Each structure stands twice: as structure tokens, then as C-alpha cells.
Amino acid sequence: MILLTGLSGAGKSTLAEGLQLKLNEIHITAEVIDGDKYRKTISKDLGFSAVDRRENIQRLAKIAEEKSRQGIVTIVAAINPFENLRIELAQKYGAKIIWVRCNLSTLITRDTKGLYHKALLPENHPDKIWNLSGVNDPYEIPVRADLIIDTNEATIENSTQQLLTYALSLIQK
């Protein structure tokens, strides 16, 4: 299980999809388990409290583990803001933690989903969101990442290649 963690907009889903495509091209079965997509299905009953965030990640990890046992390379793309949970997944499932790092100013500029705009609205604004990891909700910097991919300035192609090289080193072991 490859677990991509990072703030919203850092490039987790893009890299996960790119890795899946590259692996499939060389006849390695891979599947992306995207936190955003699963929030609309198996985790639609969950909110964004710390307890719900942990439950969401546990559900994603369980799916990834089941698929891994079938010989599928699983790539989980989710914010996963808690270091102790990432460590737990590494110990329990052998998850490899990939920190997709990007500085906040770049993420605010990108703001692909409009979340940073909403999180930075004045406190009394009706559209303000209060649970954006790294802004007004915790995101614990990975201390034990197996790989760090900095998407602040790197191209998608270079970042995907870095991830592919790492994934292939795991598969060949």
C-alpha cells in the first residue's frame, strides 16, 4: 500500500492517477483509492471531525489492504492529517508513506477546489469553512515519510517519475 498524504491541492490525486497509469502501461495492476471519491460513497456518513477523519482513513486502508492481498498495487490518496495514524498504517499494513509537500502560499494560489478561499474568509462570513487541514484544522507534518515529493515547483511529470521510480523499487523487492 502506497499512502500519499498532503494538504488539499498538493497533487495527491494527480500523482496517484499518474502512477496508476504508468504501472498499468507496464502490465502491473494498480488501483487508486482516492479520499475525495470515497467520501461520496463508503464515507458519505462521515464529517470532518478528528474522529471521522480517522475512521475515513481506516476505511480506505482496509479497502487498500483487501486489494493488496489480491496482488493489486494500491495507491491511497488522502490528506490523512494525523502522524500517529500514518505510523499505525505503516506498522499494521506495511504502508509506505509518501508526503506530497507543497507550501501553503502555492496551494492558496492554486486553490483548485476553492477551499482555501472559503477557509480564509472572515469569521462571520456564511461561506467560511472551519475544517481545512493546514489552515484552520490540524495537519501534522510527516516525520516518518518514506519519500517526500515537493510539488511546489516540480512538474507533474517529474513528480510522477519520482513516485514511479520509488514504487518500482518496492515492487522489485
Image (cartoon, rainbow, N blue to C red):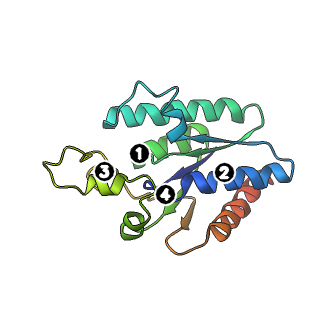
Going 25% across and 57% down the picture, which residue do you hit?
Answer: 120
Q: Gap in Å between the C-alphas at discs 4 and 2?
A: 24 Å
Instruction: Please name the residue that numbered disc 2 is placed on.
Output: 17
Q: Label 3: few (<14), some or many (≥20) within 10 Å?
A: few
Residue 131 position, x and y percent, is: 29, 45
Q: Gap in Å between the C-alphas at discs 1 and 4?
A: 10 Å
SS category of the residue bearing label 2: helix
Q: Label 2: few (<14), some or many (≥20) within 10 Å?
A: many
Q: Gap in Å between the C-alphas at discs 3 and 1?
A: 13 Å
Disc 4 to disc 3: CB gap under 8 Å: no
Residue 103 position, x and y percent, is: 41, 68
Say what amino acid the circle numbered 3 marks.
Pro
Which residue is at the front of the view, 84 or 41?
A: 41
Q: Gap in Å between the C-alphas at discs 2 and 3?
A: 26 Å
Say what amino acid the circle numbered 2 marks.
Glu
Q: Gap in Å between the C-alphas at discs 4 and 3?
A: 17 Å
